[in-house]
Image (tube, grey):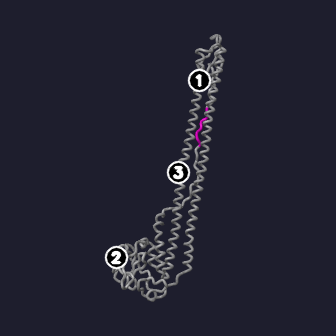
Amino acid sequence: MGWIQDVFSGKVDAVPFLENPFNGEQGSDNNQSISGGRSEANNGVYWQGANGHFYTNDGARGVVDRGTNYSAPGGYSRINDPNPPKGGGTPTGNNPLGDNTGRAPGGGTPLPALNQAAVDNTQIALDQLPALLDAALRNEETKRGNTLRGFDDQEGSQRRTYDESTTTNQQNYDSNYMESIRSGIKGLGGLFNILRGTGAAGGTAQELVRDTVGGVTANDIRMGADTQKTNQTSLDGVLSNFLTELKGKRQAAEDTFENNKRAVTRDNQTQMQDLFSKMSCYYGDAGRTNEAVSFMNRAGSLTPAIAQNSMAKQSAYDTAPVAVQAPQITAFQAPQQPDVTVATPDQVGSGIFTMNRKKEQIETPQLVPAGV
């Protein structure tokens, strides 16, 4: 089986055997003659038998006796006689591998009987390959699904956290806003009562109180709004970074899935090719040329797909959850309380307005802005 071994060892390309068959004509000395003017396939192998005849094989028409005067066309590779004479016999005719009955060509020593046990066991292995491939691919589907579901669960949890934090931030702002309004109203009412009690109500003093309390309240509201915006920006940024990283992990899982499918398929096809090669050898050793060539061609037809996926390697799925950075949340400040305090002799005051009771300086209490 030297020519079959040449094919599978890489000395002779098996793919050309799948090209178009010869288109020779019927001759007088052999079944296929090159005397006709038709074109031949551009790839194949040829050898010279012990009987002096040249033989060709393009993988489609099988072995063809080309007679004793033959010049191989370009693209054909010469190989050793795949079936040298055994026991002194001389191969003749158009089947140098003998016929399919196990008789050696030319009346030589009979060829070995077909190793039926090896053929049966190899066929059992071949029959199991499709089911093994299907199970392996379904296993990859399960791993991919589990990985993506884990990411989906984490995304759902993170979005719930974001929604809850956003709601809390808004509620804190609303609470701070209302507290600022209540504080302003309370302070304004207290100051008006003091003004009325001192006889200073109305006029400039009352307008000064109203403007001052309004400014304090507006500042409290503005600070609350700034805090709410800062917190929301932090929450949005954390969610955005999380989703970006999660998208990359999902894509990595899909890439791993596709790569693993290709690797699993390639390994299955490699096993199938090896088994086809063994079957070809079993039949070739028994002189069963047609079966030997058929299995050889089936093995060769898998070469392109195996080569295409030659770089694929199975790898584990990255199931680690995305690390989430905690958002930077700023606490809301309590609103200022507009009030009036009575100043001690050496104190200007701690409230918005301070009442000075130094009788030697002012007989009637007056309200002055704090810090003046």
What is the total number of numbered labels drawn onto the structure image?
3
- The nearer-to-camera label among 1 and 2 is 2
Label 1 element class: helix
- The nearer-to-camera label among 3 and 2 is 2
| Residue occupying image coordinates x 58% and y 62% | 138
Work out whether residue 25 or residue 40 is closer to the camera in this orientation and state it: 25
Q: CA distance from mark 1 to mark 2?
A: 107 Å
**Image height check: is 140 above or below 14?**
above
Looking at the magenta stretch, what is its main secondary structure?
Answer: loop
Q: Check whether the beta carbons of the residues at disc 3 and disc 1 lie within 8 A of each other.
A: no
Q: Position of residue 134 (x, y in %)?
A: 56, 65
**Which numbered disc, 3 or 1, marks the residue that appears first in the sequence?**
1
Residue placed under numbered mark 2 in the picture: 38
Residue placed under numbered mark 3 in the picture: 248
Q: Position of residue 66 (x, y in %)?
A: 37, 81
Q: Which residues are magenta?
A: 326-332
- The nearer-to-camera label among 3 and 1 is 1
Residue placed under numbered mark 1 in the picture: 214
